[in-house]
Image (cartoon, rainbow, N blue to C red):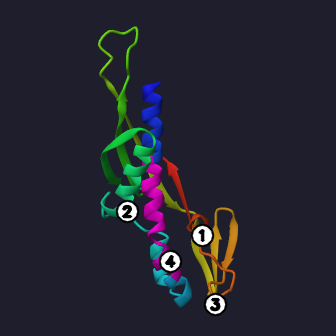
Amino acid sequence: MARNGAQTAADAAALAAAREERDLLGNQFLAALLAGDQAALRQLLTYAAGEAGCGGAPGAAAADYAADNQAELTDCAPVFGPPGFRVAVRTLGTVGPSVVPGTEDIKAVAHATAVLEPRCTLGGLSLPVVDFDCDNGPLDIDPTDAGFILDLSDFYTVHLSD
C-alpha cells in the first residue's frame, strides 16, 4: 500500500513538472501567434523542455504535488527525447507494522517520468489566422478574436512515459 502511495506521488510530481514547463511557454507562444512569427512557432513546437532542469517553477510544482500526496521530492532531473522530467519521491510515512519483521521504519520510494510532446505542426499562415495540423485534425487560431484564450493543451500533450 505504501509503495502504491509513493508511485501516485511520483506520477503526480512528474506530471506537474512537465505541465508547468509547458505552461511557461504561454507568453512566448502568444507573442509568436500575434506576430505571425512562423520560425518562432516552429521552434516552440519542438521546444526542448527541461533544459534548465528542475529549478524554478517545474521543480516547485513537482515538490508541491509530491507533498500533496504525503511524499517528499528527493530528485528531479530533465530528460530528453522527448523532453520532460524524471522525479523520485519518498513517502513521509513509513510502511508501519506488518507481518514482515523490520518494516516498521521503512519508507516507500518511487520514480516516474513525464514528457511534453507537440500535438501540432505549423500549417499555414494568413494573418491574423494561423493554421496548425494537429493529431486531432486541423486547428485554425485567430489570436485577435475577442473570445480567444490560448490553451497550450491544444498544442502539447503531457503524459507519463514509464
Image coordinates for residue 108, horizontal then vertical, percent? 36, 29
Location of mark 2 (residue): 57
Among numbered discs 4 and 3, the one appearing first in the sequence: 4
What residue is drawn where x is 63% and y is 90%? 128
What residue is drawn where x is 46% and y is 32%? 5
Task: Indicate whether 42 appears above or below 104.
Answer: below
Among numbered discs 1 and 2, the one appearing first in the sequence: 2
**Badges 1 and 4: C-beta atoms under 8 Å apart?**
no
User: Viewer-nearest of labels 2 and 3?
Assistant: 2
Amino acid at dot 3: Pro
Neighbourhood count class around disc 4 (C-alpha, 10 Å): few under 14, some 14–19, many 20 upward: many
Q: Is residue 113 visible?
A: no
Work out whether residue 73 or residue 93 is closer to the camera in this orientation and state it: 93
Neighbourhood count class around disc 2 (C-alpha, 10 Å): few under 14, some 14–19, many 20 upward: some
State the CA–CA distance, disc 1 to disc 4.
Answer: 10 Å
Location of mark 4 (residue): 29
User: Viewer-nearest of labels 1 and 2?
Assistant: 2
Amino acid at dot 2: Ala
Label 1: element kind: loop
Label 4: element kind: helix
